[in-house]
Image (tube, rainbow, N blue to C red):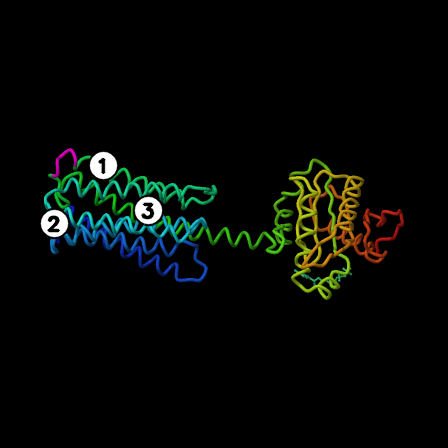
Amino acid sequence: MHIVFDAQTMLFMDVVLGFCLSIALSFSIHDRFVCPGAKAWVTALFSSTAGLLFLWLRLFVPLWISVAFGNGLILIAHALLWLGFRQYTNRHTPKDNLVLLTPVVVSMVLLWLTNIDPNNITLRSNIAAYTLICLIIMTIFEALKNRKVIETGRLLCAISLSFTIACTLFRALTIQKFAGNVSLFENNLNSLILMVSSGISLVGTGISVMLISSQWLQQRLYMHATYDALTGLYNRYALTELSETGSITKNASSRWSIAIIDIDHFKRVNDQYGHPAGDDVLREIASILKAHVRHRDIVTRYGGEEFVVVLIDCDLQQTRNWAERIRAQIESREIRIQGHSIHVTVSIGIATSSDSELDPAINAADSALYLAKRSGRNQVHVCTEESCVGMNGSISLKN
Ligand SMILES: Nc1nc2c(ncn2[C@@H]2O[C@H](COP(=O)(O)OP(=O)(O)OP(=O)(O)O)[C@@H](O)[C@H]2O)c(=O)[nH]1
């Protein structure tokens, strides 16, 4: 069989490609955990493909149907792409939906122009092309706004849309040059560029949507695996990861210290004021800790009411002073929750290390914490290799 790659066949291939991509994508977003905007983007792909189908149907249906529906659906697709990015970046407002009126108005105008003079391709084409370019520029702006480096899907989408702008502009300018003598299915460079660019733009958008969705999921999984949802601090898993990848000792020139901070009688706070109030206390303690460390230090919520702070390049005396400041700060802080004034105290166990291993230092700090609790709470204890020492100088053997 001999297949002729003329403009009409290529446009038909674009339509088939678009439908396959749209169907594949709609299956991939058939999940609860899809990123905001994904549904608008998949609808955009369907709409764009349907628009191309109407253009292709030009040979079989009245011209006004092909012109109005073909261009209208392609413009709707690009308005949806823009709306999708507004949703993705959480900047979507109900007023944004008004953008969908633009394609409707433009297709009405195209319909009217087709009725007046079916042969005036130049004006119709220019109106559709420049509206499309405006919508794409708006979308590129949204795609790139506040983009994180790892969000390569958004970058790919912007690149693929820039390519569409270049091709649309090329067609608009050449149509002007030939004064309307370029029809859609003539086998010239102009039509060919349009067909090839439509295919590339469909594939580019499809791949970008897949990439954006998977990168969004990846980021969320990373957030949940790394950060504590209640306080926003690193979680225990993150601390282990940082230790295993050597990120803690890499930043320290010599010694580093560990402080384990445990809220005293926290169960009573929960019992007396309720669990939500207990959560607020945890957030308050987290913010005090965050406010008292340097950029290089690591603050984690290690477990329920227990926090671990890694202080980089801090010797024993500096760590002791820091811990005592924190203890005093928390003791004197009045935490106001639901009309109640809550006061809590903390016990702190500290240990220093120059080793690359985190666990021995945590165990030592934990022993110090145990002694701080046993000695009456609301105090700082230090653990050295031989013994654990209280701030008041009392010494207890480690085991
Ligand atoms: N509100 C709230 N409470 C929590 C959370 N995680 C753990 N807890 C509570 O923390 C309390 C810890 O109680 P315990 O281990 O007995 O310790 P404690 O009452 O602080 O006593 P000491 O540590 O011995 O001073 C329990 O009541 C847990 O329910 C949380 O995320 N939110």
Q: Which mark lies nearer to you, 3 or 1?
A: 1
Asked where in the image residue 142 lies, by quadrant, the reply is top left
Name the amino acid, label 3. Gly
Q: Which numbered disc, 2 or 1, marks the residue that appears first in the sequence?
A: 2
Which quadrant of the render holds ligand 1? Answer: bottom right
User: What is the secondary structure assignment of the residue under circle 1?
Assistant: helix
Residue receiving disc 3: 204
Residue receiving disc 1: 170
- The residue sitting at 75% across, 53% down in the picture is 363
Q: Which numbered disc, 3 or 1, marks the residue that appears first in the sequence?
A: 1
For the magenta stretch, what is the residue range? 176-180
Camera sees residue 6: no
Residue receiving disc 2: 115
Tell me if 54 is positioned left or right of 28 in this view: left
Mark 1 Cβ and ligand 1 under 8 Å apart: no
User: What is the secondary structure assignment of the residue under circle 3?
Assistant: helix
Q: Position of residue 399 (x, y in %)?
A: 84, 56
